[in-house]
Image (cartoon, helix red, strand yellow):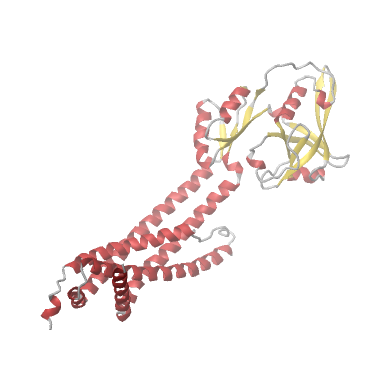
Amino acid sequence: MNLALKRLRLLVSLALQDLWHDRKVSMCIAAALIAVIAPLLLLFGLKYGVVSQLQSELLEDPRNVEIRMVSSGRYDAAWIERLRSRRDVGFAIGMTRSLNTQADLVADHRHFVDNTEVIPTAEGDPLLASLSLTKPLNGSTVVLSESAARRLNAVVNDQLSLFVSRRLDGRAERGRQSITVAGILPPEVFPRPAAFVALPLLIELEDFRDGYRIDSLGVSTGEVRGEMETHFARARLYAADIDRVAELEQWLNAQHIDTTSRLAEIENVKAINHVLGLVFGVIASTALVGCLASMLGAFLANIDRKRKDLAVLRLLGFDRPAIAGYIVLQAGTLTLAAYVVGLGLYGLGSQVFNQALASSATTGSVVCRLTFMHGVIALLLALLVALMVAVIGVLRAFSIEPAESLREL
């Protein structure tokens, strides 16, 4: 074991000393690698930065996975549950008729919002994912959009009054529900004045307008609703992710349900990713082929130049595996050094790109960046190219016989 370790140390020492002795040639080979590695890292960093930023913007905005049902229908709770159980659905909840999704919110005689959108919500709602609610959503709690909260001068835990009006038997009636603000949505999530409520409260508002008696709204007139099944006009619907939007929309369209979505924007990002990937692939392939040819020529020429030295090593007892290890060690060392320098040049270049792009209003969000895994993959690819070159060099070195060192004595 000690003998093998000593032989390995000797082999490594000879390989490194030989590289240092021929440092001018070694630097030329390393420079050829740096000239490929650094630009490719910068190019891929820009490609990854652009695409990841666009994808991040898509993922951060839940409206990008929303699918709106344009036409009204008549859907029972079983259909909504069937929709919710689909693997491409991230969130689904029934909605009442459009005329019944409005109500008046009042804080006091100076702060009120007429005809506010009343939107059903529940656990798992993508729009509410960023909120930490102070109270669970039920018939007496509400989440306000920022614009509605501003007009009501309301903050979290404030008490409000929700009013809904109807005409029954020629008389105007007004129901009232006391509600508590459990959270406020930021304007970038939902810009319009709106109140997000639990579905049972929205159903009560619709039943009230349909002439039924709803005790929770403080009105004792109207017909008793009984156990009649609730039907919904449409659903609030979000796909599980941006890749499922098209699949879910096609399924709805196949059932003759008209929909709208941001599928066009999603497809644009995918198209950009595909185009940039194709451009990077072509450039990278061309550069790698050129790098492989350059390294191969340099290594073969170097081996031919050192035929006598390699023959002496063979004469001194270095067998073919040792010669192969000698050449592979040199190729790997040069590649590792070139990668480190290329990575440093990438770091400098990426800072220049990021500062230059950040100063532009149109490209302020574009960054040049790589992950740790990208760096590891790039190193492995560089070593793979070096190994391919080394293997061809090894085959050339195997043709050198120990006797060649004696012919020139």
- Point out the image quarter for the N terminus: bottom left
Q: Which residue is depicted at the point 81% across and 17% down?
A: 222
Instruction: Give the answer, above or below, for where 296 lies relative to 206.
Output: below
Image quadrant of residue 326? Answer: bottom left
Is any part of residue 76 visible from this angle? no
| Percent x, y of residue 36 | 37, 66
Instruction: Give the answer, above or below, for where 19 lies relative to 216.
Output: below
Q: Which residue is depicted at the point 84% across and 40% down?
A: 107
- Point out the image quarter for the C terminus: bottom left
Image quadrant of residue 162? Answer: top right
Q: Between residues 319 and 136, which one lies in front from this camera angle? A: 319
Image quadrant of residue 393? Answer: bottom left
Instruction: Give the answer, above or below, for where 244 lies relative to 382.
Output: above
Q: Residue furthest bottom?
A: 409
| Percent x, y of residue 226 | 74, 16
| Percent x, y of residue 288 | 33, 61
| Percent x, y of residue 299 | 26, 70
* 184 relative position to 243: left or right: right
Is any part of residue 351 visible from this angle? yes
